[in-house]
Image: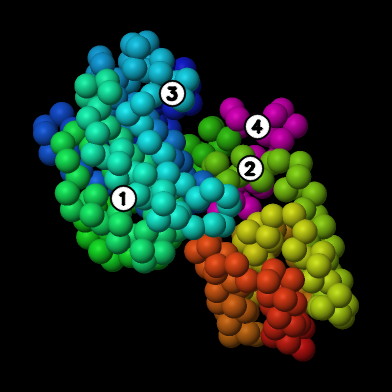
Amino acid sequence: MTNVAKDSPLKPFAWQESCWSQLIQQHQSGRLPHALLIAGEEGVGKHHLAKAFAAYLLCRTPNNGACGTCATCLLFAAGTHPDLLEIRPESEGKQIRIEQIRSLQQYANKTAQQGGFRVVILKPADAMNINAANALLKNLEEPGENILFILLTHRLSAVIPTIRSRCQQFSLPIPNDEQSLIWLKNHLSSQASLHAEKLLKMAQGNPLMAQELALESLHKQRDKLVSLMEGLTRGSDPVELAPSFIEGEIRWTLRWMQQWLTDWCRWSITEDEASISFPDMLPLYRQWQHTATLNHAQALFRDVGRLRTQLASGANPNAQLAMEALLIRWADKMLV
């Protein structure tokens, strides 16, 4: 790799080297497809890999990575490279609009301003309705010369099949714990790094997600959610608790609720406290052991998942009403 700064957007993460090597070899051998679909769980660095590969393709003097010093690399680092286009929803949880895809069509019909590749990064690829997806298909079917589409998703099954079929798919695995902990300890404050293993466990091995979990705002939200769940378990009214449950980032609230269910199911089978991802939930796990069954927990996991899918796909349910219904089902399945 070239000598650029550690974790520069011009180079991949250490755990992405295998996928990176495949991409470089395809390009150097003239076998690079016109569209890539990079899939992997949240927190494994899909966007980082896409940006690094875009930098490599746009670089004037690449080796096995972008040089970091040529004029195009400097434009890239400044976020002003005219031959890189990124498309994403205008706000969290919204869909990519068809107007955004139409602007992409105009971009795809132009020649590269720097005389080389043009790169389009679209994330998440599952955040398009059928009209936007059909508009994108026209570009994937007739891509033009020297243009690469890089689509990213952590919900591969939600990407429309006709889109998937026109892309070469890459799957980014979760790094092993050793790689993750090395990276994580270098990217946390000295205080937070003391809890690196706990954070990684809560993030189910995803290092970037573990880094996000170290944020004070998320730490406070999770502590509050634990307290609310304690109240629900003691018999508090689900409808009265619902407004507090939707405070903060609801995507994290729903993720934690699913993780707790998975954690409880694992513990209820093995009774191995060392394997618990959320030790502070153990008192509640013990109470649920007397009132819930694995079937109930699995059904509730699916209920939470449906709401997560609705929100991730850009649907806009009434958050408070949806949470009220979810908490009523939680009380019915886990606490009776």
Q: CA distance from mark 4 to mark 3?
A: 29 Å
Q: Which residue is disc 3 drawn over?
A: 80
Number of other residues with Cα within 10 Å of mark 3, as a class: few under 14, some 14 to 19, many 20 or more: few
On the image, the x and y values in percent for residue 202 come to: 63, 53
Tell me which amino acid carries mark 1: Leu
Magenta stretch: includes residue 187: yes
- Identify the residue at image location x=80%, y=55%: 223
Q: CA distance from mark 1 to mark 3?
A: 24 Å
Q: Earlier in the sequence, mark 4 or mark 3?
A: 3
Q: Which residue is disc 2 drawn over?
A: 212
* Residue 196, above or below 137: above
- Identify the residue at image location x=17%, y=49%: 142
Q: Secondary structure at mark 3?
A: loop
The mark found on residue 188 in the picture is 4
Residue 1 seen anywhere in this rendered image of the structure = no
Q: Earlier in the sequence, mark 1 or mark 4?
A: 1
Tell me which amino acid carries mark 4: Leu
- Identify the residue at image location x=19%, y=33%: 146
On the image, the x and y values in percent for residue 167 come to: 24, 52
Q: Which residues are magenta?
A: 185-205
Tell me which amino acid carries mark 3: Thr
Q: CA distance from mark 2 to mark 1?
A: 25 Å
Q: Earlier in the sequence, mark 2 or mark 4?
A: 4
Q: Which residue is disc 1 drawn over?
A: 37
Number of other residues with Cα within 10 Å of mark 4, as a class: few under 14, some 14 to 19, many 20 or more: some
Magenta stretch: includes residue 31: no
* Dot 4 and dot 3 residues touching (CB under 8 Å): no
- Identify the residue at image location x=17%, y=41%: 144
Name the colouring of the figure.
rainbow
Q: Earlier in the sequence, mark 1 or mark 3?
A: 1
Q: CA distance from mark 2 to mark 4?
A: 10 Å
